[in-house]
Image (tube, rainbow, N blue to C red):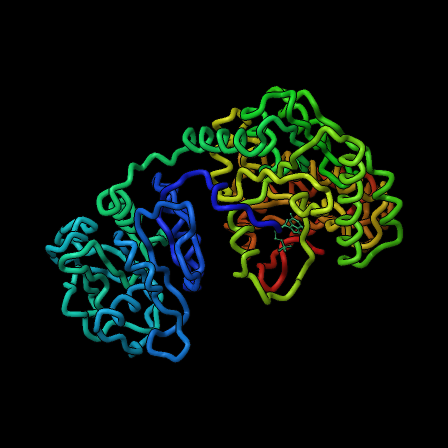
Amino acid sequence: MSQSSAADRPLDHGILVLDYGSQYTLLIARRLRELGAYSEVIDSRVKSPPAGLNVNGVILSGGPDSVYEEGSRTLPDWVTTLNVPVLGICYGMQLLVEQSGGKVRGATKREYGRAAMHVRSTKGPASVLFETTSAPQTVWMSHGDDIGAIPKDYETAGVTDEQVIAAIIHKTLPIAALQYHPEVAHSEKGADLLKRFARDLCKMTLDWDGQARVETLCKHIQDVVGTGHVLVACSGGVDSTVTAALLLKALGPERVTAVFCDTGLLRKNEVPWVAEKLKVLGLRHLEVLSSADLFMRELKGITDPEQKRKIIGRLFIEEFEGYASKHKEFTHLGQGTLYPDVIESAGHGAGAKVIKSHHNVGGLPDRLALKLVEPFRWLFKDEVRSIGLCLGLPDELIHRHPFPGPGLAVRILGDVTPERVKMLQEADHVFISALREHGLYQVPWQAFAVLLPIKSVGVMGDNRTYQQTIALRAVTSSDGMTAGVADLPMSFLTRVSDQIVRQVHGINRVVFDITTKPPATIEWE
Ligand code: XMP
């Protein structure tokens, strides 16, 4: 993935979150942005702050290291020379304590989960972070080390029922440190503390909201594209659709062309549905590449999941490249790349085993010789959704369930044929329509049907049947990395099952997948 220059960022000021490897680091930045304070995440090992970002404050994240162990990550010198407010969280707290002459020790018992913190009255500048009340507040702990002795320049701002030091602040500087995680929703006043940090200590105006995002991103697009013409690859998903809509707003309908590759592996009525939504927003140039025959031909006889994914990824690129090379007017390629992808490709996900070779239209090759315009490469998905709503895209599009790049091919186990695609499309349509009709669509984070490669015996009327099986999958999740099973009423599921068997010719059995991720994955292939 190509890297964009520092000047690409939508705002020139914000809070910098130094990542020490906590599972919650991205959540810190998300929370701050939800509160209206723009923020960015960088690896704690970088040698200087990002060029072009006026740093209003620094947050040191948690992390798995122990400050007293050889090779543990340290506090970069440049943080101190910035002279801005600093908030250390968990490992970040321990770094501040160690650096200022306090003592960090291995906790006698690992603390994980809720604790009750009592706030103490303090005088240092960071006392504005805490509301002093006599009632204890719930805080979320997750640590193996704790503070044995606080540095002499600090005062205690909070202790738990168990007498663990939960919060300290510097006596004269705008520095605070927390043993708990304010970014986690279980920390009762965590969001309030982050808001006070941004507003009262860093003196930021909390104006990073939907409208501000649209305005700054439109300006950014106009600067990057100049008088050029953008080609945007649409997949029907939220990110690429909102990218197209934002490009339209920034550049007008004559300088944006959306290309939709109809692989024949999309959901029922997908292409005309999304095209219609974009047309309403003023899109005039939409090219639908009718590639279904090509995809079916190349997938014929392929049953191995990885092989299917590789073929589809290659065909996507070839189709798109073919189109772009015939139209020389394009100067830029619009992509819906998101901030977590950018951070991950900068190394955080390095070394992970490949479980599935994921792909999406964001994976187009450099040899296209188009400059990239990626308005969302600094944004989180929820921010993209809010931009989509500000731009007038309908809620039903913005809050759709995720859909995998390789489409229905990874939901058809075994051979992918036009007949089996049709069968799955119909069954999936029954399931998803029923979820919507019963007001249950938002209960699962993602729901879909899968066509299994097995036949079983049934009875319809007085006749024996020997037909195919559909599995229904409905999961809860926040990011697709882990998943639970969505709690759908059994009466609803049996009604859907009846409807599928009645309406979809060739299906005589429906099962419901009750496996979490891990050990299973969300998709079946
Ligand atoms: P798994 O099956 O890996 O899926 O548990 C996690 C989430 O990712 C989606 N998914 C994909 N998305 N390209 C994508 O853009 C892909 O190749 C791909 N494979 C799976 C899946 O639908 C789920 O939301």
Q: Is residue 388 above or below residue 342?
A: above
Q: Is residue 291 left or right of residue 495?
A: right
Residue 462 in view here: no
Q: Report the residue at 55% width, 46% height from top.
A: 4
- Viewport quadrant of the C terminus: bottom right
Q: Report the residue at 81% width, 38% height from top.
A: 322
Q: Is residue 421 above or below residue 63?
A: above
Q: Report the residue at 54% width, 32% height from top.
A: 221
- Residue closest to the eye, 509 or 276: 276
- Residue closest to the eye, 184 or 92: 92
- Residue closest to the eye, 333 or 238: 333
Where residue 55 appears, as percent x and y from the top left, is 34, 48
Q: Report the residue at 81% width, 49% height from top.
A: 468
Instruction: Choose top left, top right, bottom left or bottom right for residue 147.
Output: bottom left
Where residue 31 appears, as percent x and y from the top left, is 38, 47
Residue 86 in view here: yes
Where residue 351 appears, as percent x and y from the top left, is 59, 67
